[in-house]
Amino acid sequence: MATRSTIAMEFADGTVQQIYCHWDGYLEHNGKILFNHYVDPYKTRELIDMGGISSLCNTIEETKQGAYHFWRGEELRVEKFNDFQDYLAHHQYEEYEYILRKDGHWYVQAHDDAFVMLKSALADAQDLIAQEETEE
């Protein structure tokens, strides 16, 4: 079963662009990859410019293999918003929403909760996993 997500970027001028990702949107996969491999805004821009993707990989080259525009010849689809408030009001909602804000930090919204810093969400998820392992 797919865990759908979106990946967005807020640009220096305040505009926001968003793409769809079909597989593995959960924190332990897409969250970790974005946090560890897409902190460079230029690399994130390359990712956004590909449009919707099947799955996120550690590199642009690997991810491009699953980009719908390249892989299946589909129309390039990137959602565009005037600013962060427009994004909040009209963005595509999926199970996980990731956004690289212009402050240089990744944020995540899981299952319609509030946006939180991705770093904190990953730490909380790791703590939960460790707790579950000790209870077993």
Image (cartoon, rainbow, N blue to C red):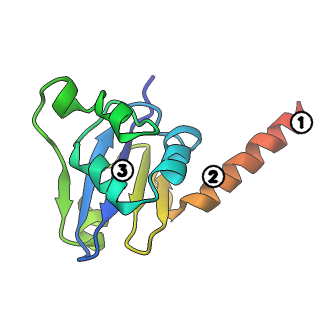
Q: Residues within 10 Å of mark 1 (few under 14, many from 20)?
A: few
User: What amino acid is labelled 3 in the image?
Assistant: Ile
Q: Which residue is the site of mark 1?
A: 135
- Secondary structure, mark 3, is strand
**Distance from the alpha carbon under mark 1 to that under mark 3:** 34 Å
- Residue depicted at x 61% and y 56%: 121
Horizontal side, residue 38 vs residue 122: left or right: left
- Secondary structure, mark 2, is helix
Q: Find residue 64 and name its label.
A: none
- Percent coordinates x, y for residue 29 in the rendering: 54, 38
| Res. 80 image quadrant | bottom left
| Res. 2 image quadrant | top left
Q: Which residue is the site of mark 3?
A: 7
Task: Judge whether 14 appears above or below 113 on screen.
Answer: below
Q: Is residue 92 visible?
A: no
Q: Which residue is the site of mark 2?
A: 122
| Res. 45 image quadrant | bottom left
